[in-house]
Image (cartoon, rainbow, N blue to C red):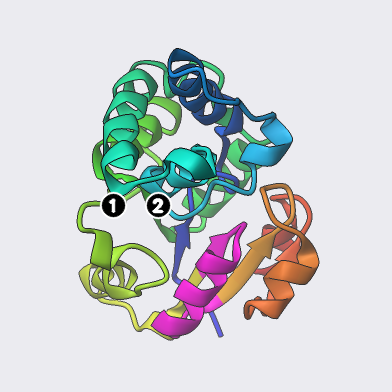
Amino acid sequence: MKYKGIIFDLDGTLVNSLEDIADSMNKVLQDLNYPTHSYDVFQYFIGSGLRNTVAKALPAYNNTDEQIEICFESMVKGYSESCTLKTKPYEGIIELLDNLVSRNIKLAVFSNKADELTKKITAEIFPDYFDASVGLTVESLKKPNPFKALALSESWNLKPEEIIFIGDSEIDMQTAVNANMFPVGVTWGYRTEGELNASGAKLVIHNPLQLIQAL
């Protein structure tokens, strides 16, 4: 089949944003005299939206809904000011996007990061590459709910099976399966090849340019 569109996850797929996210959350934890976490630990906190990251980072002895909400607001305020400070594309991503654009393949971003932040990061780091950039607006519509992926498919006037969904987490693979799109996992992000395969990946790649070979 000739694929005509690709939907990318953002964090761990297009960009390495781990340090900016971790630094912002650790600042919140430090201000409250709570234990902080290493970057290695934070990579398992990322993937289901920033609110979920906050909930996982808080200590178990003070992890109430009220505390999560207070810390989430504080974290997002700091993160929105520094979300592109250390964040940058993975090696080979720009070359991949240039190649895909030359093939007239439609491109979009779908992230569980807040919509405003998703749009800001995409616009600053990848100007002019993507037809759409979609983030989290309503909690019930976050991945692996396929609603927004299917909305992108409809906006492109493409069938879901004509679209590749590429990401670095089990949530991305589940989203692709739920949307009836072709799931491609990447190993340069935050999850292992085994986790991606177990979650439904039909192809796992180890560097961005392998996607071109697959096409």
Residue 23 pos. (x, y %): 54, 21
Q: In this rendering, is residue 61 above or below 125? A: below
Is 115 on the left or on the right of 169, as rendered? Answer: left
Residue 194 pos. (x, y %): 79, 70
Asked whether disc 2 touches disc 1, contact meaning CB atoms under 8 Å apart, the reply is yes
Query: From where the camera sits, is residue 3 visible?
Result: no
What is the span of residues highlighted in magenta in the rendered image? 165-182
Which residue is found at the position 43% from the left and 33% from the top? 126
Name the mark on residue 43.
none
Front position in the image: 3 or 34: 34
Q: In this rendering, is residue 213 above or below 137? A: below
Return the residue at label 1: 136
Q: Amino acid at mark 2?
A: Ser
Disc 2 element = strand
Front position in the image: 118 or 133: 118
Residue 171 pos. (x, y %): 52, 66
Name the mark on residue 111.
2
Is 208 on the left or on the right of 101, as rendered? Answer: right
**Label 2: few (<14), some (14–19) or many (≥20) C-alpha neighbours in 10 Å:** many
Quarter residue 28 falls in: top left
Quarter of the picture containing the C terminus is bottom right
- Residue 175 lies within the magenta run: yes
Disc 1 element = strand
Which residue is found at the position 69% from the left and 50% from the top? 208
